[in-house]
Image (cartoon, grey):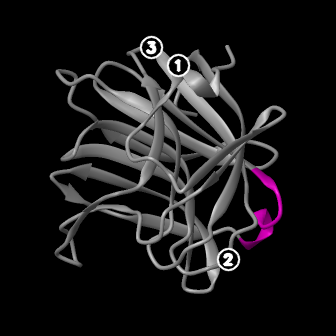
Amino acid sequence: MNLLWAKGEWTNQPENVIEAGDELWVTAKEQSDYWNRTSYGFIHDSGHGLLSELKAGSAMQVEFYLDFDQQFDQAGLLLFANGDNWIKAGVEFSDGAPQVGAVVTNFFSDWSVSAVNQWANSWVTIRISRTERDITVRAGVDNLSLLRVAPINPELDWFCGPMLCAPSRSGLTVRFRNWQLLDADKALH
C-alpha cells in the first residue's frame, strides 16, 4: 500500500518540502543528524524523519535518488520509538564514497557501513521489516540484499518513514518516491 506524504509526521521540520508529482523533495537543515553518544560523545536528535506507525508483521519501504556527495549527507529510513531507541538505515556519504549502512541505537549508537559507489545516480530502495522483537533491513538498486538484523524493544511503539540528515552542510535536497507499507518479509534469506 502506498502511503500519502501528508499522512506522516516530521520528527523535526526540514528546511523545505515540495511535492513534485509522485515525488517528495526534501531539503535538510544544516547540522541535522541522529546520533547518540558512542565514539563522538555527543547526542544529536535534529534529523528529519517523516514517520507513520510500523506494527509487528509489517514492513516499510521507500526509494530515494542517490546524487549527494558531501561528507555525512544521508538518506533512507528512520525507525523511531524515542530519543534513546531508534534505527536509521540507508546511504551516508562518508570518506569520499556513498556507504550503505545502519545505525542502531539503544541508548548508545553503533554504525556499520560498506561502500556502494555503483549506486551513485540511481534510485536506491530501503526496506525495514518488523517482527514483534526484531527488524530486518534490506537495501539495493535492482535487487534488495540483507543489510542488518537487529533487536528492538517490543514494549515500545515504533514509527518509520523517509529520513535525511545533513550534519556538515546546508543545501542537501533528497528526492523520495514510493513510500510503502507492506507485509513483513517472511524469511531472512
Residue 3 figure quarter:
top right
Query: Which residues, given as a range, are shown in magenta?
Result: 117-123
Could you tell which of marks 2 and 1 lies nearer the N-terminus? Answer: 2
| Residue at point 46%, 43% (across, down) | 49
| Residue at point 60%, 17% (across, down) | 182
Q: Is residue 135 magenta?
A: no
Residue 108 figure quarter:
bottom left
Q: Quadrant of the C terminus?
A: top right
Q: CA distance from mark 1 to mark 3?
A: 5 Å
Q: Element type at marker 1?
A: loop
- Residue kind at label 3, given as amino acid type: Gly
Residue 65, visible in the rendered structure? yes
- Residue kind at label 1, given as amino acid type: Ala
Q: Element type at marker 3?
A: loop
| Residue at point 41%, 55% (across, down) | 47
Q: Are marks 1 and 3 in contact (CB under 8 Å)?
A: yes
Sort mark 1 into few (<14), some (14-19) or many (20+) by Cα contacts within 10 Å: some
